[in-house]
């Protein structure tokens, strides 16, 4: 396949890309179409590496309304609801919902997802279901699983044993939730135990860390410390980090270099953070999302996650990482040109780096996995939540969509509307 006349995320235009044996064989201007190769005219549209979701919960997705809806929309009612739903779950229903979500994801050009899976269930039903899903979707979607002790590693009696079993069964990443343990000390202890477990097994770590408006929730400091102590640099992620929004500025000025030095990645979940945090505030009301521009400026790799789609915590969403990027851009006020481009990176290259995906990106030798977006730039892609014209994984076309258009019937006006930037 030869894709011709594409725009790349770095702004280069008039670029051709040759795909051979599932890999990018050449990329640049003026490539010659080999005999027998299919020609795809990109018409100047944006050719991007696929979207990557750094933080998701596939065991809960599409369960909204089961067994009832979250009437208040709060985190606490969501956790209570999940507790009500868990005993009613079946492996078949979990697999069915997860596969349906993966279909949505593929159609939106989302081809790699890191999903947490709750291990606080002695049956490990969700673990078994998502391991089966991971295997089934492997030809078209990279699903990485995190063993997540939702009820607390030390707070829940069987959590550590279950988490270890989940890793034995093939779950990829060690999870945690230190702010949910009974005490700050227990939270710190859970971080130590989990980082040591990951170091022993050569695994990555991704913890729900300080998902709270409490400015004294400082488990990210402990996470950075153990990352450094155990030589886990580049393999550890702090997810949410919402308490950092509320922390004292002086303390943050010490914390940011520690996170950067330890090579700890950060994940913000803009849609969920803006809806679940700040709920105890009157006015002014905190946004609660972590300090994204400041983390980036300190040299920390920051990705955005979708976190939830139609589950006990969040009733909206469709697997569209451009919606996530757009919300992140607004909440972080990253409205400068560099800031907006950084938000696109947060749902593509930064997330891929955090997951340790190999062969990712628009360069020769990498997987020919990409999405053609009906936009002229990454900023325009976010603005329009651009149509995914073509979604390809290792040279295989997975999804196509027609150009987004509307036919107008207005006196003295053109009949087609064009939302893209005038050239
Ligand atoms: Zn989460």
Image: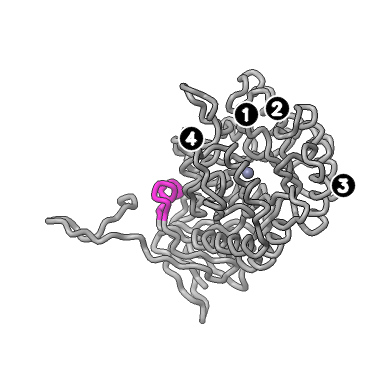
Q: Position of residue 332 (x, y in %)?
A: 50, 33
What is the secondary structure assignment of the residue under circle 4?
helix
The answer for how far apart the CA atoms under marks 3 and 4 are is: 38 Å
Of the two numbered discs 3 and 1 on the same chain, state the one appearing first in sequence: 3
Residue plotted at (48% across, 48% down): 316
Whether residue 309 is visible here, answered yes or no, is no
- On whether ligand 1 comes within 8 Å of the CB at mark 2, the answer is no
* Crowdedness near tag 1: few (<14), some (14–19) or many (≥20) residues, C-alpha within 10 Å: many
Q: Position of residue 276 (x, y in %)?
A: 54, 36
The answer for how far apart the CA atoms under marks 3 and 1 are is: 29 Å
Of the two numbered discs 3 and 2 on the same chain, state the one appearing first in sequence: 3
Tell me the colour scheme of the image: one colour
What's the magenta region?
375-386
Q: Position of residue 129 (x, y in %)?
A: 69, 61
User: Which mark lies nearer to you, 4 or 1?
Assistant: 1
* Crowdedness near tag 3: few (<14), some (14–19) or many (≥20) residues, C-alpha within 10 Å: few
Q: Which mark is residue 218?
A: 2
297 with respect to 235 (left or right) = left
What is the secondary structure assignment of the residue under circle 2?
loop
The answer for how far apart the CA atoms under marks 4 and 1 are is: 15 Å
What is the secondary structure assignment of the residue under circle 1?
helix
> Which residue in the structure is indicated by mark 1?
243
> Which residue in the structure is indicated by mark 3?
200
Of the two numbered discs 3 and 4 on the same chain, state the one appearing first in sequence: 3
Q: Which mark is residue 331?
A: 4
The answer for how far apart the CA atoms under marks 1 and 2 are is: 8 Å
């Amino acid at each position: 396949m030869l894709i011709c006349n594409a725009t790349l995320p770095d702004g280069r235009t008039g670029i051709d890309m040759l795909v051979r044996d599932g890999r990018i064989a050449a990329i640049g201007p003026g490539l010659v179409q080999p005999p027998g190769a299919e020609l795809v005219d990109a018409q100047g549209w944006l050719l991007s590496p696929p979207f990557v979701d750094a933080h998701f919960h596939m065991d809960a997705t599409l369960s909204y309304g089961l067994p009832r809806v979250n009437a208040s929309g709060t985190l606490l009612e969501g956790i209570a609801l999940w507790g009500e739903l868990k005993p009613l779950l079946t492996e078949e229903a979990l697999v069915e919902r997860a596969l349906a979500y993966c279909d949505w994801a593929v159609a939106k050009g989302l081809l790699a997802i890191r999903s947490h899976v709750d291990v606080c269930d002695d049956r490990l039903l969700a673990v078994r279901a998502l391991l089966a899903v991971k295997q089934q979707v492997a030809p078209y979607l990279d699903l990485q699983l995190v063993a997540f002790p939702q009820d607390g590693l030390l707070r829940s009696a069987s959590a550590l044993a279950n988490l270890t079993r989940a890793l034995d069964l093939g779950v990829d990443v060690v999870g945690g939730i230190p702010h949910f343990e009974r005490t700050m000390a227990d939270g710190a202890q859970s971080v130590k135990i989990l980082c040591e477990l990951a170091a022993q097994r050569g695994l990555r770590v991704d913890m729900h860390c300080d998902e709270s408006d409490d400015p004294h929730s400082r488990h990210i400091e402990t996470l950075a410390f153990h990352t450094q102590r155990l030589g886990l640099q580049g393999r550890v992620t702090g997810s949410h980090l919402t308490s950092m929004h509320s922390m004292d500025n002086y303390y943050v000025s010490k914390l940011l270099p520690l996170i950067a030095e330890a090579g700890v990645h950060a994940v913000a979940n803009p849609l969920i953070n803006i809806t679940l945090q700040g709920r105890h505030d009157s006015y002014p009301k905190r946004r609660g999302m972590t300090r994204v521009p400041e983390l980036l400026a300190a040299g920390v790799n920051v990705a955005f996650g979708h976190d939830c789609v139609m589950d006990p915590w969040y009733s909206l969403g469709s697997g569209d990482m451009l919606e996530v990027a757009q919300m992140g851009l607004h909440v972080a006020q990253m409205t400068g040109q560099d800031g907006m481009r950084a938000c696109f990176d947060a749902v593509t290259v930064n997330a891929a780096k955090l997951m340790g995906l190999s062969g990712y990106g628009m360069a020769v030798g990498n997987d020919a996995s990409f999405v053609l977006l009906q936009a002229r730039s990454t900023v325009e892609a976010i603005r329009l939540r651009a149509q995914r014209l073509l979604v390809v994984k290792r040279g295989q076309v997975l999804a196509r969509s027609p150009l987004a258009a509307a036919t107008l019937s207005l006196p003295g006006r053109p009949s087609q509307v064009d939302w893209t930037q005038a050239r």
